[in-house]
Image: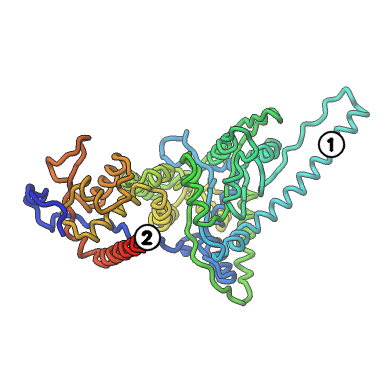
């Protein structure tokens, strides 16, 4: 069926159907690839595979959480310099990760297995810190009695690694007394952490802003009317938590897109299954525990970690590809997330490098990041993390949803060309409620995706295209979609006839 007759853009330009590009598939569910556990350095990869099989959970979810745990255990003063000649930009290995999946994905046991060594380290540090603090308080009391003229010793610097359900004020109060190494915030259900920000505040906004700053680390003054000011030398947190798909999409849709979600590495976890009843690989378990102990105990080096020339070459190719993808992507939410990927790539390289150095018994700053390490990070980001990000942010893009509705109508009606105002309003009731600019955005999206081309000379009063030619290939390629859409429309029409008749 043809909605608009007359001279087409193809006729004017003397183009053939072969001149049309391959249209983007707007209807298929993007199959987010599995997490490539095999490229994760040992002992993380081996432990993740072993525990995933035992639990019946996606090993990629364990591997990603384990990498974030390594990053959180590492002292923030161990930094990487991503560029050859710019020592003013350095990154710590601070990662925010959010595996996404329903309860059946077994997120909780998987994440807890990855974090288990960190909780033990935190328990030991708390015990040591409590002992130091008790001795200091005892000394201060004794001096107040016996030597009141003497200045008491300074308060000892404490150590803390893990936080659970914690407020900004509490975390700030603890970290103000601790080594400036950073910490890990773990929430079994990340939705609770996201929704709790400013839950008890009038006006809100400050908690969220403080947590956003924790992604980059550095000094921070936490000011509260009731508790005064706290100065934290390094307000820094690795954030880890699982979340259900509908919860994170609802949160993302309700926020003002302040960059909170864009800070997270998002991974759609595979469905959980039955675990295997066998003995765990205790050697892998022990190596993983010792890795965390080694990383947590590594002191800062003399300078930042550098990249080898081979690693720089890989990094630059990665950055170029991410930049081109970001510039060409019509999804603004995805583009905003990718804007952080240069720093994220550096953080992942430092994390991978730290695991390898721990295994080799060397300090991270003693060796540059190798080309092979940089390539593993590049492959992980381009071939796994990017498709997962595309899948997630597609659900936040209202323009793409509208474009998909128009594409379905085009297929159902078999249009070769159509007029926007007349044909859309006639056959798609939803479009009658769209603002003019929303319709224009949907048309531009279909144009950029290779579905349409404007017919020259046919303009609206706003100067936007009023009529379009349709890529002739879409009718053959998406014939099944066209059939399903026509059946759906026929069913709706029949139901409406029955309602009116009844």
Classify mark 2: helix, strand or loop: loop
From this view, report whether residue 69 is shown above or below residue 141. below
Work out which quarter of the rendered image holds the C terminus and state it. bottom left
Q: Which of the two residues, 436 or 209, is positioned nearer the viewer here?
A: 436
Q: Residue at x 67, y 40 (%)?
A: 171
Q: Is residue 125 left or right of residue 239?
A: right
Work out which quarter of the rendered image holds the N terminus and state it. bottom left
Q: Please tell me the numbered disc located at residue 474.
A: none
Q: Residue at x 39, y 56 (%)?
A: 387
Q: Residue furthest top?
A: 149
Q: Residue at x 11, y 48 (%)?
A: 9
Q: Residue furthest front?
A: 502
Q: Which of the two residues, 192 or 70, is positioned nearer the viewer here?
A: 192
Q: Which of the two residues, 188 or 158, is positioned nearer the viewer here?
A: 188
Q: Is residue 156 left or right of residue 405?
A: right
Q: Residue at x 36, y 49 (%)?
A: 318
Q: Is residue 226 left or right of residue 82?
A: right
The number of numbered discs placed on residues in the rendered structure image is 2
* Location of mark 2 (residue): 30
Disc 2: CA contacts within 10 A as few (<14), some (14-19) or many (>=20): some
Can residue 192 be seen in the rendering of this structure?
yes
Classify mark 1: helix, strand or loop: helix
From this view, report whether residue 8 is shown above or below residue 303. below
The image shows residue 126 at horizontal and vertical percentages of: 74, 47
The image shows residue 391 at horizontal and vertical percentages of: 40, 55
* Location of mark 1 (residue): 137
From this view, report whether residue 227 is shown above or below residue 416. above
Structural distance between the alpha carbons of marks 1 and 2:
59 Å
The image shows residue 88 at horizontal and vertical percentages of: 47, 33
- Mark 1–mark 2 CB contact (< 8 Å): no
Please report whichever mark, 1 or 2, sits nearer to the chain's N-terminal start.
Answer: 2
């Amino acid at each position: 069926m043809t909605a608009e007759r007359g001279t087409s853009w193809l006729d004017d330009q003397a183009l053939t159907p072969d001149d049309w590009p391959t249209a983007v598939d707007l209807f298929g569910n993007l199959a987010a690839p599995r997490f490539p556990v095999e490229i994760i350095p040992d002992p993380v990869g081996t432990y993740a595979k072993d525990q995933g099989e035992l639990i019946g959970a996606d090993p990629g979810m364990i591997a990603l959480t384990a990498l974030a745990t390594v990053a959180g255990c590492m002292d923030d003063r161990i930094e990487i310099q991503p560029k050859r000649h710019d020592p003013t930009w350095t990154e710590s290995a601070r990662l925010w990760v959010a595996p996404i999946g329903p309860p059946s994905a077994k997120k909780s046991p998987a994440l807890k297995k990855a974090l288990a060594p960190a909780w033990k380290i935190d328990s030991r540090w708390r015990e040591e810190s409590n002992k130091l603090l008790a001795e200091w308080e005892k000394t201060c009391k004794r001096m107040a009695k016996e030597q009141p003229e003497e200045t008491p010793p300074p308060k000892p610097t404490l150590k803390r690694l893990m936080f659970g359900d914690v407020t900004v004020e509490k975390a700030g109060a603890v970290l103000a007394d601790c080594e400036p190494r950073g910490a890990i915030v773990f929430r079994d259900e990340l939705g609770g952490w996201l929704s709790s920000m400013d839950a008890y505040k009038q006006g809100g906004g400050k908690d969220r802003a403080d947590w956003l700053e924790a992604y980059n680390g550095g000094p921070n003054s936490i000011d509260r009317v009731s508790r005064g000011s706290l100065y934290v030398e390094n307000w820094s947190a690795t954030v880890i938590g699982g979340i259900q798909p509908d919860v994170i999409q609802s949160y993302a849709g309700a926020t003002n897109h302040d960059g909170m979600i864009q800070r997270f590495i998002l991974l759609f976890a595979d469905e959980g299954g039955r675990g295997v009843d066998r003995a765990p690989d205790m050697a892998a378990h022990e190596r993983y525990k010792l890795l965390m102990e080694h990383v947590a105990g590594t002191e800062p080096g003399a300078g930042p970690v550098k990249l080898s020339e081979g690693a720089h070459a890989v990094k630059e190719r990665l950055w170029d590809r991410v930049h081109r993808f970001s510039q060409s992507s019509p999804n603004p939410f995805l583009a905003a997330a990718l804007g952080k990927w240069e720093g994220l790539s550096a953080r992942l390289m430092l994390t991978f490098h730290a695991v390898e150095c721990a295994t080799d018994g060397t300090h991270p700053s003693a060796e540059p990041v190798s080309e092979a390490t940089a390539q593993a990070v590049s492959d992980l980001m381009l071939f796994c993390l990017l498709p997962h990000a595309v899948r997630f942010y597609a659900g936040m893009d209202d323009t793409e949803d509208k474009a998909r509705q128009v594409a379905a109508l085009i297929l159902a009606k078999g249009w070769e060309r159509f007029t926007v105002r007349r044909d859309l309003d006639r056959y798609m009731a939803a479009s009658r409620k769209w603002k003019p600019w929303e319709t224009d955005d949907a048309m531009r999206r279909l144009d950029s995706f290779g579905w349409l081309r404007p017919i020259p000379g046919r303009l609206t009063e706003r100067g936007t295209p009023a009529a379009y030619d349709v890529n002739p290939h879409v009718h053959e390629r998406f014939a099944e979609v066209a059939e399903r859409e026509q059946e759906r429309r026929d069913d709706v029409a029949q139901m409406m006839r029955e309602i009116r008749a009844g």
